[in-house]
Amino acid sequence: MKSHRIEDLKVWSKSMALVKEVYLVTAELPNEERFGLLSQIRRCAVSIPSNIAEGAGRNNKNEFYQFLGIAFGSTYEWQTQLQLLIDLNFISETKILPLKELLAEIKKMIYSLKTSLKL
């Protein structure tokens, strides 16, 4: 198997767009959260496209599948962190809704890509 060009993977592009949005939205968090939830949310968001990219760079579809699984797990971790932002009243649900929608789309794309690798 040859490695994939990450620029050609829509799921990678969408997850990169998600990271940009995360940075913009979390810039509004209180300063006391700079090294707490804010740092965790950003790291987790970055791990989604990073794991997709690392898997795509492997010359083995089983390894790509494994890294997609890690990225998929990060989407759920990140969804939990988004909910914490809402529950702690740091950000309104209305402001988070577009991120949740994009995240749902990314989850479906990762799942579909994983399925295609197992065929």
Image (cartoon, rainbow, N blue to C red):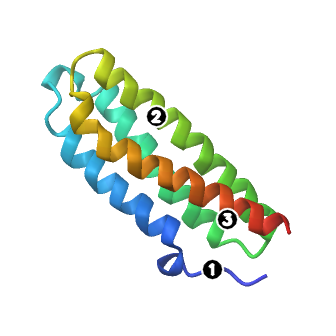
Please name the amino acid that badge 2 sits on. Answer: Gln
User: Which numbered disc, 1 or 3, marks the residue closer to the eye?
Assistant: 3
Q: Are marks 3 and 2 in contact (CB under 8 Å)?
A: no
Please name the amino acid that badge 1 sits on. Answer: His
Query: Residue at the location (13% across, 35% down)?
Result: 28
Instruction: State the SS at label 2.
Output: helix
User: 9 above or below 101?
Assistant: below
Instruction: State the SS at label 3.
Output: helix
Instruction: Tell me the crowding category of disc 2: few under 14, some 14 to 19, or many 20 or more residues within 10 angstroms, Cα based.
Output: some
Instruction: Tell me the crowding category of disc 1: few under 14, some 14 to 19, or many 20 or more residues within 10 angstroms, Cα based.
Output: some
Query: Residue at the location (53% across, 74% down)?
Result: 9
Instruction: State the SS at label 1.
Output: loop
- 3D distance between C-alphas at marks 1 and 3: 12 Å
Disc 3: which residue: 113
Q: Position of residue 72 (x, y in %)?
A: 61, 47
Q: Is residue 38 left or right of residue 24?
A: right
Q: Are marks 1 and 3 in contact (CB under 8 Å)?
A: no
User: 72 above or below 4?
Assistant: above
- 3D distance between C-alphas at marks 3 and 2: 20 Å
**Furthest residue in direction right, as rendered:** 119
Q: Position of residue 78 (x, y in %)?
A: 46, 36
Disc 1: which residue: 4
- 3D distance between C-alphas at marks 2 and 1: 27 Å
Q: Quadrant of the C terminus?
A: bottom right
Please name the amino acid that badge 3 sits on. Answer: Leu
Q: Is residue 99 left or right of residue 113?
A: left
Mark closest to the chain's N terminus, 1 or 3: 1
